[in-house]
Image (spheres, grey):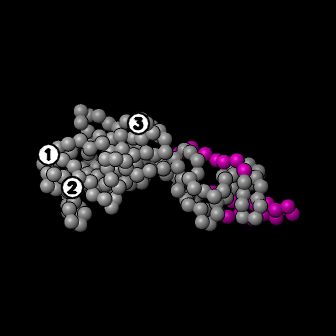
């Protein structure tokens, strides 16, 4: 049987980790027969086992036995839905009191375990308030009482402990996930 995945040329290549294809116009067909009608392929879906880079070969055999194939590579990533209140997404600037804790809430389209951060992340670094230019070396963030990330109600919650010495400065929070994607939020501290 031919191995194939059909996406239209205009279909996005963003996929959800371990789940359904996001916003794709056609169904995944892997190791299964399907039907082709014009530019549309239908058949059973395929659920990727983990995030990463995948090369998919599309092979078609017509009714006369002629074959053709093509391939493309796509990357499967988490379905990051943006930061939730009280953190605003770029290009907005967040205001926080230096020394306070900031609940950093976000969704990845479901519970993907608590091991979602890349090694050494989240991080923060001082930035120029007017331009956002980096002013130092990023450092891993601190958690109050050694707490970590939690999941509940369809979202992740990471509590970021800020430093009182940051009053009057700006910082950039960088959340790098273990799928390689990077999410950023800028803060001005009072």
Magenta residues, as a range?
A: 43-70
Tally of marks = 3
Residue identifier under label 1: 164
Residue 47 is a magenta residue: yes
Distance, label 3 to label 2, CA atoms, is 27 Å
- Measured as percent of width and height from the top left, residue 88 is found at 33, 53
Where residue 37 sits, quadrant-wise, is bottom right
Please tell me which of labels 2 and 1 falls first in the chain: 1
Q: Nearer the viewer, mark 2 or mark 1?
A: 2
- Measured as percent of width and height from the top left, residue 4 is found at 69, 55
User: Could you tell me which residue is drawn at 12 percent across and 48 percent down?
Assistant: 165
Using the rendered image of the protein, determine whether residue 118 is visible from the camera's viewpoint.
no
Using the rendered image of the protein, determine whether residue 60 is visible from the camera's viewpoint.
yes
Residue identifier under label 3: 151
Element assignment for label 1? helix
* In this rendering, position of residue 31 left or right of residue 134: right
């Amino acid at each position: 049987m031919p191995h194939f995945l059909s996406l239209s040329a205009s279909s996005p290549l963003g996929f959800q980790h371990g789940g359904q294809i996001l916003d794709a116009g056609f169904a995944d067909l892997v190791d299964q027969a399907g039907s082709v009608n014009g530019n549309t392929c239908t058949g059973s879906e395929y659920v990727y086992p983990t995030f990463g880079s995948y090369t998919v070969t599309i092979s078609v055999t017509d009714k006369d036995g002629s074959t053709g194939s093509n391939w493309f590579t796509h990357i499967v990533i988490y379905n990051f839905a943006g930061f939730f209140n009280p953190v605003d997404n770029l290009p907005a600037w967040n205001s926080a009191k230096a020394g306070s804790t900031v609940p950093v809430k976000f969704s990845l389209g479901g519970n993907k375990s608590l091991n979602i951060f890349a090694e050494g992340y989240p991080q923060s670094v001082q930035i120029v308030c007017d331009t956002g230019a980096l002013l130092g070396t990023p450092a891993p963030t601190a958690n109050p009482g050694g707490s970590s990330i939690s999941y509940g109600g369809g979202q992740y919650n990471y509590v970021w402990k800020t430093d009182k010495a940051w009053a009057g400065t700006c910082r950039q929070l960088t959340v790098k996930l273990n799928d390689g994607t990077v999410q950023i939020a800028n803060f001005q501290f009072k």
